[in-house]
């Protein structure tokens, strides 16, 4: 039997969840005997292969049209989709923008922010269009496994991947729902 194909991507995220994935340390080496990471934002291969993968992992909230497209593509190309981290599971800190108008949020970020000099809101057809509200991944596509945390611990990530490799549906509870 060949290796289980895994693809990861991030949406509106800080990269903390992918750093937690790297925090698997030597356990990652053991996992790589059983899995092949086909694409990840921390490698040169950025998109899941068209042939598909067994496991897709998304971090971050869905904040713009590009995020939405990436989430839909990952869902189409994977058998099991994991929402990894609070932003993917609940919308996280990105959804703070939902408490004001989009215009107010953009003005605050690009014009009023204390570190901005001669700020203006960017306007280019090359930029992804913001969605009316930031969303959790499961508000856009079907998610099979939710692993909250900011970021989730390496132990929790290892547990979920190990359970999937053993053919079981991971239960995320107790010790896997806290981070020290």
Image (cartoon, rainbow, N blue to C red):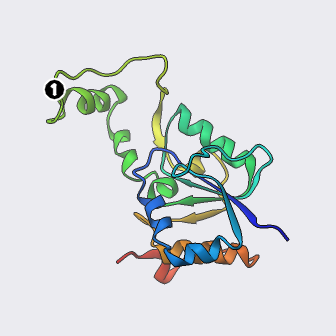
- Quarter where residue 4 is shown: bottom right
What residue is rendered at 43% in x and 49% in y? 13
Residue shown at the point (69%, 48%) measured from the top left: 75
108 in relation to 96, above or below: above
| Quarter of image, res 118 | top left
Q: Evaluate whether residue 148 shows in this view.
A: no
Percent of width and height locating residue 49: 73, 46
Q: Which of the two residues, 43 or 101, is positioned nearer the viewer here?
A: 43
Closest to the observer: 158 or 121? 158
Q: Position of residue 5 (x, y in %)?
A: 73, 60
Residue pointed to by mark 1:
117
Label 1 SS = loop
Q: Residue furthest bottom?
A: 175
Q: Is residue 108 above or below residue 175?
A: above
Q: Seen in the image, is 10 located left or right of residue 36?
A: left
> Which image quarter holds the C terminus?
bottom left
Residue 55 shown left or right of residue 106 in the figure: right
- Residue drawn at the location 54% of the way across and 31% of the way down: 65
Q: Quadrant of the N terminus?
A: bottom right
Q: Position of residue 79 (x, y in %)?
A: 76, 57
Q: Residues within 10 Å of mark 1 (few under 14, many from 20)?
A: few
Residue 40 on image: x %, y %: 58, 51
- Tell me how many marks there are: 1
Can the viewer see residue 113 in this picture? yes
Query: Against 89, is 126 above or below?
Result: above
Q: Is residue 144 left or right of residue 9?
A: right
Residue under the point 52% across and 78% down: 26
């Amino acid at each position: 039997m060949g290796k289980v194909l895994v693809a990861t991507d991030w949406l509106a995220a800080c990269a903390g969840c992918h750093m937690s994935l790297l925090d698997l340390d030597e356990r990652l080496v053991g996992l790589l005997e059983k899995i092949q990471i086909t694409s990840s934002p921390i490698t040169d291969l950025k998109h899941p292969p068209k042939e598909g993968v067994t496991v897709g992992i998304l971090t971050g909230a869905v904040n713009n049209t590009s995020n939405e497209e990436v989430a839909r593509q990952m869902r189409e190309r994977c058998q099991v989709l994991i929402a990894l981290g609070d932003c993917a599971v609940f919308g996280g800190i990105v959804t703070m923008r939902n408490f004001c108008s989009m215009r107010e949020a953009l003005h605050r970020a690009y014009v009023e922010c204390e570190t901005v000099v001669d700020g203006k809101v960017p306007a280019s057809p090359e930029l992804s269009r913001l969605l009316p509200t930031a969303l959790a991944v499961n508000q856009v596509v079907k998610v099979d496994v939710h692993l909250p945390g900011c970021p989730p611990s390496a132990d929790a990530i290892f547990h979920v991947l190990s359970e999937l490799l053993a053919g079981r549906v991971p239960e995320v509870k107790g010790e896997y729902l806290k981070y020290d």
